[in-house]
Amino acid sequence: MSEFRQLMKQAGGSPPHPLDMDDVRSRAARVGLARRTRLGLLAVLGLAGLAFPVGVALSPADRPADVRTVDDRTRTVDERESDLDAAPSVQGQERTPPVVAAGRRPGLASTPNRDQSNTAGSSTERETPNQATVFASDRSGAWQIYLSDTSLASARVITTGGGVKSRPAISPDGAWIAYIYEATDTTGGSLRLIRRDGTAERTFQLNMEWDDPDWSPDGRTLAVSFRPHPSEEGESHRWAVATIDVNVRATHAHRKVVGGEGHNFQPVWSPDGEELAYVRIGDTGTAAIWVTDSNGSGDSRRVTPEGLHALQPVWSPDGTRIAFVGTRGDGPAHLHSIGTDGSGLSQVTDGDAWDGRPAWAADGLSLLFDRDVDGHRAWGCRVGASVEGGVVNNCVPGANGPAPGQLWSVDLSTREARALTSGQHNSIDPRTQRLR
Amino acid sequence: MEQLVETIDSVETVDEFCHREYERLFGTLRLYVGDLVLAEDLTQEALARAVKHWPRVRNMDAPGAWLHRVSINLANSAFRRRRALRRAEVRAGPAPDSYEDRDSPTVVAVREAVRSLAPRQREVIVLRFFQDLPVRATAERMGCAEGTVKGLLADAIRALRESGLEVEDDE
């Protein structure tokens, strides 16, 4: 062999790490995705790896050095953060009076993102006092977060710009909305807060992938799913549950409360703030709802039975039951509810459609949810657990067609379901909040 | 039954394919993009494409050639490159060049000289001198005529020599 060829071999070298097929498969699940609506949760089954120590909080040095601009706005996130000067109000006091009757906000009529024609059923929709509803929709052409204080017909857009926004959750005082932002050219979601009038935004610049924010009843803490970025060297891709004190600004400290075996994600607070329900996918690949103390102490207990794939839990307002999405085998996903002690399992919806993201109405009498009537194309979207080649897929709308989904409501006493939105655009990820 | 078992065993799985191609693909990309971390990232990205499209790829006459094309396309994509660089920085910090220190000055010089070539020259040099592909196979990989390969090789070798490297004529 010539000397130059030998030098070329040396210059090419050997990979610094052995091939990780789990990482490759994880990437493969995202191939071709220009946009991901993150309706589900990307998770890789059966991966062994590094676990984050309990209570870990990234130092400022661990945070990305860049200050990213948000969407198409001219100011940077940090600039807007300085405007805020504080995290969301924990006393129920907003710094500005953004609460304007929905639909009468100055300038709203000319907002191109507002699409009344996309909404149906508003005349008969039950209006629940003191309840705000948020959801994600692509009705403007881009996935944005919408807020409604009364009926969905009056929902107004909160966010602007590009990227994909999903998983909104509104704070108990109604002042802030947490959501997941994903730029179209990056992997993983970042956690953001935005005021209900869209005037200020804050990004938690932790070098992690985030999902599923949920506010504690006192509005002080967010429960989230998180994991290291998939490409981070030497670390596993297991999801874990953490809580973030939204008032800690120095490091945006987060505290791991559920981790270890399998993937743990989609945390939701109990109404009294004492417990968290979450999803665990163990090495068997079965997703189940578990409950644990919200401070991470004590044992976890399994709520849903064996043989039922259960995801996306949400507590009833009185704290006695948990609604969730469940399916057996490859069949459609339906809403279920179960007592927090595992008793009284009840299937709420049925039929061929694939239902997801249940949210209790503040009066506890109905569930809001998103429905995909052609859900076989987006199984991962609906329940976040398409097991294919050992990989639990996220929503992959780009791969199998447009992300489907409309908002529906089901009466818990009659089991009657009705559409709240319709049209060619999609509305998904509803979340309600009883405002104090 | 014995024949059936043999037939099944002869079918390459996607894992076997990825493991077989891994080192060669990484070396190709290392030379093509010049950066170790980025090359590793692009390698994984290219293999992910193979996994994604395996039902189609496995029936190709030359899946390795397809993988090569995909990897070069990925490396050429400014969008992908930026994205991969960001991930690389997340993984290894903003100074991945520190890896270069482990190699001898001559190897570093070769890498830098190859990196300075035009993309098509770089590709032809890597295919001929790193992968040791014949001219015909190189032309197939690059989707061009053998004469084009020879022309690109001549230009690339000339450029490498101007960089101070001793490069023998292509045989």
Image (cartoon, helix red, strand yellow):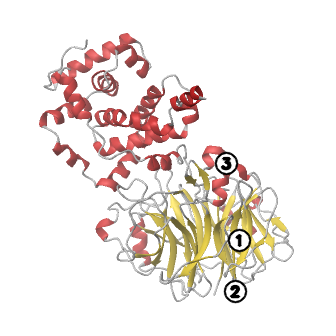
**First of labels 2, 1 by sequence position:** 1
Residue A241: mark: none
Residue A295 in sight here: yes
The residue that mark 3 highlights is: A402
Residue type at the position of mark 2: Asp
Q: CA gap, disc 2 to disc 1?
A: 31 Å
Q: Residues within 10 Å of mark 2 (few under 14, many from 20)?
A: few
Residue A201 locus on image (x, y percent): 48, 70
Residue A217 locus on image (x, y percent): 58, 84
Residue type at the position of mark 3: Pro
Side (left or right) of A375 relative to A250 = right
Spot the residue most to the front: B2
Q: Residues within 10 Å of mark 1 (few under 14, many from 20)?
A: some
Side (left or right) of A176 relative to A307 = left
**First of labels 3, 1 by sequence position:** 1
Residue type at the position of mark 1: Gly
Q: CA gap, disc 3 to disc 1?
A: 29 Å
The residue that mark 1 highlights is: A103
Local secondary structure at mark 1:
loop
The residue that mark 2 highlights is: A318
The image quarter in which residue A127 lies: bottom right
Task: From this view, report whether residue A163 is shown above or below residue B110.
Answer: below
Query: Label 1: chain?
Result: A
Query: Label 2: chain?
Result: A
